[in-house]
Image (spheres, rainbow, N blue to C red):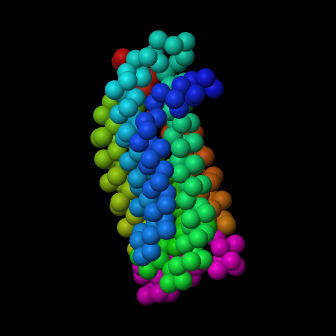
């Protein structure tokens, strides 16, 4: 698996995938929805899968002494690693934003501890939609991205609406997850912990369901 994952990194990642890591810096933009930068992380998957298809990666992988499940597992690991790197790149810039932009983020949630927990949960669901859709036929990553994109923007509204209206309704939890003071961010740690657990469990479920779908594909 180590060698196969190394193949994924060297042969399947397109140069533009590395360029897309720059979108993690969008978290620095004042008065701008913080979820948007992470959406471009999903857009980069389209280039990854398209690059693989153009290079006949599935056909090449099928002649190797591995199973279909191994093919899916390696791709899931690659994407998970990419998403973790993308997220980690954004963290120091989120810290800079919190301490440098004194007016906060008037466009939505602050890039705080709770935000990253929510992002991990959203990522887990989006990964499940993308991978399970793609591996039903092992083709048309654009369709898989479209489904993921529709879900992402619906969830963007669902997640941001309570933040936009938190002062109107006075719900303590929504007020808490939008705060950036140290005490509040410590209280937000359970949200981050939940995000990490859900992301890991989501990865396992995504892999198993996608592998099951791919096993049914006649290549």
Q: Nearer the viewer, residue 194 or 17?
A: 17
Residue 55 versus residue 124 in the image, above or below: above
> Taken as a whole, is the magenta stretch helix, strand or loop?
helix
Q: Is residue 214 magenta?
A: no
Q: Is residue 211 visible?
A: no
Q: Which residues are magenta?
A: 162-188
Seen in the picture, residue 176 relative to 215 is either above or below; the reply is below
Q: Quadrant of the C terminus?
A: top left
Q: Nearer the viewer, residue 203 or 1?
A: 1
Name the spot of residue 13 as percent of width and height, x first.
46, 35
Q: Residue at x 45, y 74 (%)?
A: 30
Q: What residue is at 36 percent from the left and 27 percent from the top?
A: 53
* Quarter residue 214 falls in: top left
Instruction: Answer left or right for 42 relative to 97.
Output: left
Residue at 54%, 83% (x, y): give it. 102
* Residue 113, percent from left and from top: 61, 67
Where the N terminus falls, by quadrant? top right
Residue 57 visible here: yes
Residue 184, placed above or below residue 88: below
x%, y% of residue 186? 70, 72
* Spot occupied by residue 150 in the image (x, y as percentages of width and height): 32, 54
Number of dots carrying numbers: 0
Towards the viewer: 203 or 14:
14
Residue at 70 percent across and 79 percent down: it is 183
User: Does 175 lie within the magenta span?
Assistant: yes
Residue 61 vertical position relative to residue 103 in the rendered view, above or below = above
């Amino acid at each position: 698996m180590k060698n196969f994952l190394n193949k994924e990194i060297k042969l399947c990642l397109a140069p533009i995938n590395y360029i897309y890591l720059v979108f993690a810096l969008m978290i620095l933009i004042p008065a701008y929805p913080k979820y948007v930068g992470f959406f471009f992380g999903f857009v980069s998957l389209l280039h990854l899968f398209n690059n693989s298809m153009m290079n006949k990666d599935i056909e090449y992988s099928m002649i190797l002494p591995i199973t279909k499940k191994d093919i899916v597992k390696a791709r899931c690991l690659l994407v998970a690693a990419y998403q973790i790197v993308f997220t980690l790149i954004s963290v120091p810039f989120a810290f800079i934003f919190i301490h440098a932009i004194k007016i906060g983020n008037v466009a939505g949630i602050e890039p705080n501890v709770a935000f990253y927990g929510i992002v991990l949960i959203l990522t887990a669901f989006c990964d499940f939609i993308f991978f399970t859709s793609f591996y039903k036929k092992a083709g048309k990553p654009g369709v898989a991205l479209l489904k993921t994109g529709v879900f992402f923007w619906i969830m963007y509204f669902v997640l941001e609406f309570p933040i936009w209206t938190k002062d109107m309704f006075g719900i303590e939890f929504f007020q808490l997850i939008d705060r950036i003071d140290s005490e509040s961010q410590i209280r937000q740690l359970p949200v981050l912990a939940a995000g990490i657990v859900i992301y890991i469990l989501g990865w396992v479920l995504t892999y198993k369901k996608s592998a099951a779908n791919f096993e049914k594909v006649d290549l």
